[in-house]
Amino acid sequence: MHPVLTTVLKRVGLGVVTLIMVSAIIFSSVSLLPGDFGESVLGQAATEETVAAFRRELGLDEPAIKRYFNWLGAAVKGDFGTSFSGRSASGVDRSRSVASLVGPRLYNTLFLAGITALVAVPLALILGLTAALYRNSFYDRSVNAVTLTTIATPEFFVAYILILLLSSLWPIFPSLANIDASTPLGERLYRITLPALTLTLVIVAHMMRMTRAAIINLLASPYIEMARLKGASRSEIILKHALPNAWAPIATVIAFNLAFLVVGVVVVEVVFVYPGIGQLMVDAVTTRDIPVVQACALIFAATYIILNLIADIIGIVSNPRLLHPR
Amino acid sequence: MMSSADNVVADTVSNTMDNEYLVDMRGVHIEGFSDEQWHPIINGVDLQLKRGQVMGLIGESGAGKSTLGLAAMGFARAGCRICGGSIHFDGIDLLSATDAEKRKLWGGRMTYVAQSAAAAFNPAHRLIDQTIESATRAGARSDTSSGGMNLHEDAVELYRALKLPDPENIGQRYPHQVSGGQLQRVMTAMAMSPRPDLIVFDEPTTALDVTTQVGVLAAMREIVDTYNTAAIYITHDLAVVAQMADVIKVLRYGEEVEQAQTREMLSSPKEAYTRSLWSVRSLEKQEAKNDDEILRLENIDAAYGKTKVLHDVSISVPRGKTVAVVGESGSGKSTAARVITGLLPQLGGDVIFNGESLPVALANRSTAQLQKIQMIYQMADTAMNPRHTIEEIIGRPIDFYLGLNKSEREQRVYELLKMIELDETFLDRLPSELSGGQKQRVCIARALAAEPELIICDEVTSALDQIVQEGILKLLLKLQQEFNISYLFITHDIATVKAIADQIVVMFDGKVVEQGMKSEILNPPHPEYTQLLLSSVPEMDPDWLTRLLNEQSDRAEIMNR
């Protein structure tokens, strides 16, 4: 077997192990959350017996270890259990499965993240490469200054500024990004313009600066001097001689920012009333809807692990020493 | 070589009527930027080179050789600027040329061969693509010497001419997949590919083993001869430059010391500085025997992971004497040192020190055992913590092993500084403020601070200039006489061996080829490998390489490295 394949498989295995460890951490920390779902739903008036019966129904009376393995075993099969919400003291059960709650929200989040990434990643790469190419020029300094400003500004503030400019003063885009399953694609894109733009402004700076730094870091290498002495032009040096050796750090920072687009956008979701997974999780924490909280946390962890795994693999594949061993 | 160069001048005189010289540098001044100000690097040097001529540029590091060589191409490194004089290449004024104009010359009519081939090749691209990159850029070649061949075939021909193994396919490899000697030859092919008028060789063989160096030197000389290319050959190794150059220019502190034809320069150097360069290699220690053994390696086997690197190695070190371990890189010299110090536990065999067997693992050795064996490394730079002052660096082993109080310790550091011929003004300095030779002296003081009986010196002079080398070797000899210290001296340089050794161990491929007193090893008869190693050491005779190549009936042995 090709050694790179072995390395990649090892990384995948490690990723799975990490995910299992994270699931244990999630489960135990959720168990440590103060308060009790039974008490909070049934209210102060409920008798001890009612609460105990309610807990038994939800399976909360079983030992934590057993509950953990039940939950993990089901989660592996894609079954994240049933949401606690929708139950009430009246005994009417309008609860829904966690998957049916999380599914559409996750889709919305991935949609917003995907569209943002499609714009932000190429933009950041182009800005980073051109900034490296025209290093220390007016262009370089302006790009740096602008991206630094956007990253230094809190994202809700960026969002409100954009709303003020683009939907209030000049009403071009809607300030509410409320979509549902029936919204057609064109309409969806139109409505998420402002949140996507906000997120782009937030993440471009980091990726762009890392690209620039990774390239410039390599420009001091002897092989870049050699390339210059072989008559390579500036753009050839950047694109042909530096970039192929810079993919690993660039991929890492891109993965980090893409993960942020999935797990870190709750503020932007709230501002634009976008039905994403972040809001769902916050709501679930407030109502102590443990199955939903656990499912969301697991999805977030998996996002980080998978994206970092991809970055690792790009790092391995872009390294000729690993790809073409002696 | 001179005669052919003259012919070329005659041949090409028709199209270069007004340029007698291919390279014509006059009164060149170059400055470098450091510590927030510009410092002069080159102070008004003239350099004229005719077509087909090879000029050797020699001098210590910091003399400005590389800077001058690159300036001949109109190139200044980042942080350097050419601030005076004139530089013409075939009548083109390089100082007023635009970047675009210079790029047409670079990689076309003038090319560069760098010191470290491993660093000068882009790790991300195949060798063949890098070899023909500049020629591809220069477009279809008008030169008839490559005939109708395409660049790819031409590169293969160059690989063949440079005696690279498997010339058809080696280009498909990546830089990390071939050896250093091969990479240096591929770089020469890369420089030759556009059939330039000028090649600047910047210490092209300094990083190679002597046995590998011979092959690379021969290949470079042959190809420069064949295509009548003019070359500037930068090196600090006189014996090497004697083989390559028609003319030698000696530089010091950015100024020209003298220039003369090679033979004249070697036989009768005019300046005192040049003569001092010449005399360094004459240092020689009188060998002496001692039957009292301080260290014995018995049938050591060792491996890195699954790769076995030492096979049944037995070495004996007499007390108060120097044993030089010689061999090329990969022969297991440094691995043997790692086994002795406990850094690499051996798989089999014994390390006997002062009559007792040392525990295999470092962790099981007593402080006293650790104290008695100290080590000095090749790269003094990386062997010292850059944020510690010299006092802290030398004081640490004193604290660790001797536990002196503050004033005793201060006194001891001061004594040690005196021993290495530095004064107390160095106490508060950081390693970065010291020269290469001073750094190595501090490393020696650090080893001495532990009051060891045996010091392992791993290529301690290899990174230094010859004059500085001489100082370090003399210091080590003095310390040996004073404190009866034993040295295990790892080196690949035979001149160093002559200067310091009592006994020699020759290693090859993880095995001991032979060992014995210096006089026995250096005088015939030799085992085959020792013969190869000794004959590969360049001599200060311009005909040495030619003679050696004629003698070597079995050239394949060297060429295939």
Image (tube, coloured by chain):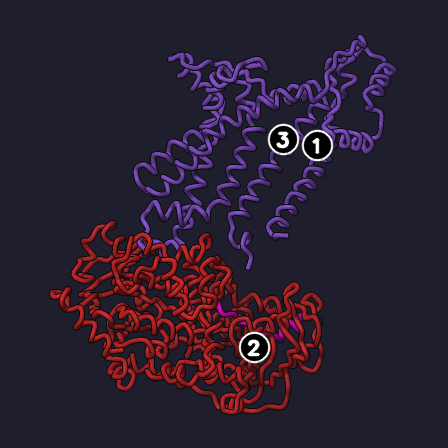
Chain colours: A purple, B red
In this view, B40 is above or below B544: above
Which callout, 3 or 2, points to the residue nearer the camera? 2
Q: Residue furthest right?
A: A49
How far apart are the alpha carbons under marks 3 and 2? Answer: 56 Å
Q: Nearer the viewer, mark 2 or mark 1?
A: 2
**Which residue position is annotated with label 2?**
B508
Q: Mark 3 Cα within 10 Å, few/some/many (few <14, many 20+)?
A: some
Residues marked 1 and 3, same chain: yes
* Of the two numbered discs 1 and 3 in the rendering, the one whose residue sits closer to the viewer: 3
B247 shown above or below A325: below
- Whichever of callouts 1 and 3 sits on the residue coming sooner in the sequence is 1
Q: Is residue B519 above or below residue B85?
A: below
x, y (%) of residue A321?
Answer: 53, 55
The part of the chain drawn in magenta is B366-380
Q: Residue at x 64, y 86 (%)?
A: B293
Label 2 packing within 10 angstroms: few (<14), some (14-19), many (20+): some
The relative height of residue B555 versus residue A234 in the rendered view (above or below) is below
Disc 3 sits on a residue from what chain? Answer: A
Seen from the viewer's position, the closer of residues B223 and A200 is B223
Q: Secondary structure at mark 3?
A: helix
Residue occupying the point 54% across, 84% down: B504
Q: Are marks 3 and 2 in contact (CB under 8 Å)?
A: no
Of the residues shown, which amino acid type is indicated by label 1? Ile
Residue furthest out toward the front: B148
Q: Residues within 10 Å of mark 1 (few under 14, many from 20)?
A: some
Residue occupying the point 51% across, 45% down: A248
Which amino acid lies under the numbered mark 2 shown in the image of this protein?
Phe
Q: What residue does disc 1 label? A: A26
Residue B410: in magenta span = no
Q: Which residue is mark 3?
A: A300
**What subunit carries mark 2?**
B
